[in-house]
Amino acid sequence: MVALQPSNWDDPDRPDVYAAEDDFVEQTGVDMLPRVDVPGFVAQVLADAGLDIPLPVLVFDLPRDLRMGGYHHSPTGEIHLRDEPKIDAELVLHEVAHHIVGSRPSHGIVFRSCLAMLVEAVCGPQERDLFCNCLRERGLDVFMWHRFACSGRLQ
Ligand SMILES: [Zn+2]
């Protein structure tokens, strides 16, 4: 049985984070965050972000007509996605950010800052700033998560 209601559904920041993501995609255009082949994209994102952490387990088990595109299940490290060959990059980045920050408050400042870092890793620093502005316009704060801060590769 697939749990279609993730445990973070009651997070008060969730709707505003979703809206800020939509604002960002609208302002940058779909070329910046196209539909992607998920396994290769996830591995590339983590490498680009300098994160030497286990890859999430990808499970393509959500019905294609389900409005929710995906969710991360913290206890198992699984990312559940719609059963489609390609998925919106923005959605994948969102779930990868959940994978990185784990069970911290779902869409809180640590999650948002991690997601902004991933946006920079994939799109660039200008797009990161644009995404942060989209968050702030929705009343959501964010801090600068430097990409090397948690990589352990500075030695
Ligand atoms: Zn989420």
Image: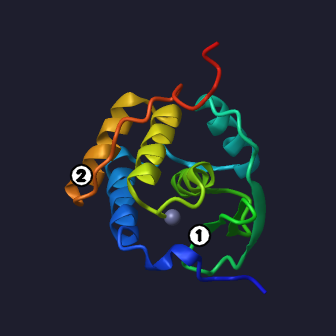
Q: Nearer the viewer, residue 103 or 26?
A: 103
Badge number at residue 116 = none
Q: Position of residue 13 (x, y in %)?
A: 36, 67
Q: Does dot 2 land on a helix, a strand or a loop?
A: helix
Q: Pointer 2: what residue? A: 136
Q: Position of residue 148 (x, y in %)?
A: 53, 25
Which amino acid, mark 1?
Gly
* Rendered view: 27 above or below 50: below
Q: Pointer 1: what residue? A: 69
The residue sitting at 71% across, 39% down in the picture is 53
Q: How packed is label 1: few (under 14 Cα within 10 Å), some, or many (20 or more)?
A: some
Q: Position of residue 141 (x, y in %)?
A: 28, 51
Q: Is residue 31 visible?
A: no
Q: Is residue 108 visible?
A: yes
* Rendered view: 87 above or below 70: above
The residue sitting at 63% across, 54% down in the picture is 99
Q: How packed is label 2: few (under 14 Cα within 10 Å), some, or many (20 or more)?
A: some
Q: Earlier in the sequence, mark 1 or mark 2?
A: 1
Which amino acid, mark 2?
Arg
Q: Does dot 1 land on a helix, a strand or a loop?
A: loop
In this rendering, position of residue 20 left or right of residue 148: left
Q: Position of residue 104 (x, y in %)?
A: 52, 59
